[in-house]
Amino acid sequence: MRNRTRRTAVVLLALAIGLHAQAQEAAARLAWTRRLDQPIVALEWSTSGNCVAAATTSTVYVIDADGTSLWDWNYRQTSRFLRLVSYRSFALSPTCDAVVLPGDPSYRYVLSADRIGGRQLLKTTGTPLSVRFDLTGQTVAVATGASKAYLLSPALEVRWSGATASLPVDGSGGTGGAGRAG
């Protein structure tokens, strides 16, 4: 009886694995394709899942989840010194209307662009290593290699700066009071 129970359990497990694999296969299908003039060097999905940004060595293309082009930004026209290298992360707002790009060790700036044409840049202390929008799209967090962090508006206005260890963010989604304002 015990062997029969084991065989039944193994058959049920194999059946469940097979059904799960079939469901995954059916769920993963090509929704759309897009041709760009240059190879993609970096890709970011918005936290809302409503759009994706594909970056080439000169331009960021923002495309909605249906494959429709929303807007693009030739960041090399804003700054000829900025270079996005392969798979360097950048930030795309959850509303798909703003992008923030980090510099590199030779260019210690972050650049932002919005859908209506606004362009800003901010010099950072240290190499910007990570840039991210919050879930509302109202705040951009930047962490640098010099253990310095910034909380910025999407237009790169400094709301807070200080040591990375003092970043005034807690796990509940609120902000604390550590660090230096402005």
Image: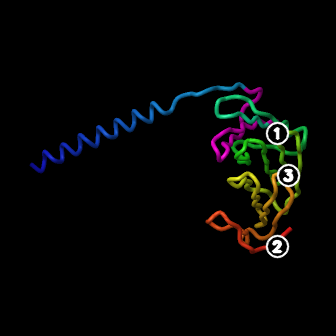
The residue tagged with tag 2: helix, strand or loop? strand
**Residue farthest to the left, as pictured:** 1
Asked whether 143 or 81 is in front, the reply is 143
Q: Can you give x and y, in whole percent of width and height, for residue 104 in the image?
A: 80, 52
Between the C-alphas of marks 3 and 1, the distance is: 12 Å
Q: Which residue is mark 1?
A: 115
Query: Disc 3 residue type?
Result: Ala
Q: Which residue is mark 2?
A: 180
Decide: is 15 above or below 181. above
Residue at horizontal 40 percent and vertical 36 percent from the top: 21
Q: Which residues are magenta?
A: 36-59
Between the C-alphas of marks 3 and 2, the distance is: 20 Å
Q: Can you give x and y, in whole percent of width and height, for residue 102 in the image?
A: 79, 51
Q: Mark 2 vs mark 1: which is more N-terminal? A: 1
Q: Can you give x and y, in whole percent of width and height, for residue 175 in the image?
A: 71, 67
Answer whether residue 133 is magenta in the image: no
Query: Disc 2 residue type?
Result: Arg
Residue at horizontal 74 percent and vertical 68 percent from the top: 164
Label 2 vs label 1, nearer the camera: 1
Check disc 2: other Cα within 10 Å, few if <14, some if 14-19, many if 20+.
few
Q: Mark 3 vs mark 1: which is more N-terminal? A: 1
* Pointers 2 and 1 in contact (C-beta within 8 Å): no
Answer whether residue 38 is magenta in the image: yes
Check disc 1: other Cα within 10 Å, few if <14, some if 14-19, many if 20+.
some
Quadrant of res 129: bottom right
Decide: is 142 above or below 36. below
The label on residue 21 is none
Q: Mark 3 vs mark 2: which is more N-terminal? A: 3
Residue at horizontal 62 percent and vertical 65 percent from the top: 172
Asked whether 145 or 181 is in front, the reply is 181
The label on residue 155 is 3
